[in-house]
Image (tube, rainbow, N blue to C red):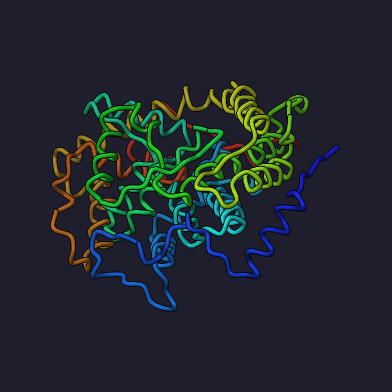
Amino acid sequence: MLRYHNLSEELQERILEDRKNHVVNPYAFRDEDILRRNMEHDRPKLWRPAFVRDVEKIMHIPFYNRYADKTQVFSLYKNDDISRRSLHVQFVSRIARNIGSMLGLNLDLIEAISLGHDIGHTPFGHAGERKLDALYYEETGRHFNHNIQSARVLDQLLHQNISLQTLDGIICHNGEMELQEYRPRPYSDFQEFDRRVEACYLDRAANKALVPATLEACVMRVSDIIAYLGKDRQDAIRLNLFDEEPNYTGGKIGTTNAEIINNMIVNLVENSYGKPYLKMDPDYFEAFSNGKEENYKMIYGNGAVDQVYREQIDPMLEEVYQRLLTDAKAHDRNSVLYKHHIDYIRKLTQYNQSITVNYEETEPNMIVVDYIASMTDDYFIDLYNYLFPKGRHQVNYIGYFDDL
């Protein structure tokens, strides 16, 4: 039986009374405190407030389009009912704005972080991320993390003059790390941001140690997990991943997508309203953590899901990486790397007068990483077949009627 929890009557009355009296949350990030690298540009206007500019910048770059064909969890399925990364970021945004609205936080900042947090994600989900990290590390001793790459795309690759607060929320969104309490650690300069980013390239542990600077970023971080926990279960069932539906533990948060979203929002708001942190009850946190662990055991670690990555996608990524790296080192202007990536970046940024560095002079491995991380699943498969028409590896998509 489905169980949906409600906010206490006392808190509901308090929220309504505060709204009636126009009470402002002192812990919400204020638009007037926004910080950009170039404060002379992108000044807020009545019809385009501070963080609305970030939202629109993110939504209008071509990389945002590519969310539509990037794996969330399940690759190589022709099925319009399962989540792609485009749907995931919308779910995150909706859940985070719901929580933020109840807490009186800055909803535009929440939306900007949510929509941009996976913009640098690889094709083939976290499996693609792990392999790209291994390849990049083997060549350079540096790590690839999709959250850092998301900030790089917006800040260093396309030079969008995105705010520090949005970029911080993006690098700190690590949706693999659930906490019972999320307490922001504010800072207010790009030097600290750049230091944090560089540390993540050098040390794997640094990425896990990131703490958001704003309460809005904390909300988005926990919403990232809420958004995929139940939805991934829906998708697994839709794809007939199990012989019989798993018996999830549930606990306080429930087992279905709708229960998890409702109950987590309710408990977070109940424990966090009017406070400088985000918190859930211990029994909710226990159920939340157990639910994620069960997903790893039953879905993400499922042999059927993992096999295609190990046997086909990983070796394809390795071959493509090495071929692109050869072209990058040779400065082969006739290569697909130049025509589809380097020249493309140049065209996207040609009118940006703030750019002082020639992207072509970027370290070759970084250029290759930028290119591969920007790819959709289908583009990568087509690129592999283009570069290696007689390649040893191939993947077969599971079609709409293959289970009939």
User: Where is the N terminus found, in terms of image quarters?
Assistant: top right
Q: Position of residue 402 (x, y in %)?
A: 69, 36
- Where does residue 41 sit, x and y in percent of width and height? 26, 70
* Rendered view: 350 above or below 173: below
Examine the image and state in which quarter residue 279 appears: top right
The vertical placement of 6 against 140, above or below, is below
Q: Residue at x 78, y 25 (%)?
A: 244
Of residues 32 and 193, the one drawn nearer to the viewer in this rendering:
32
Q: Would residue 275 be seen by someone viewing this image from the given angle?
A: yes
Q: Is residue 23 left or right of residue 149?
A: right
With 156 as the anchor, is 243 left or right in this view?
right
Q: How many marks?
A: 0
* Quarter assignment of residue 211: top left
Q: Residue at x 42, y 71 (%)?
A: 49
Q: Locate residue 234 relative to residue 99 in the image: left or right.
A: right
Picture layout, residue 115 above or below residue 379: below
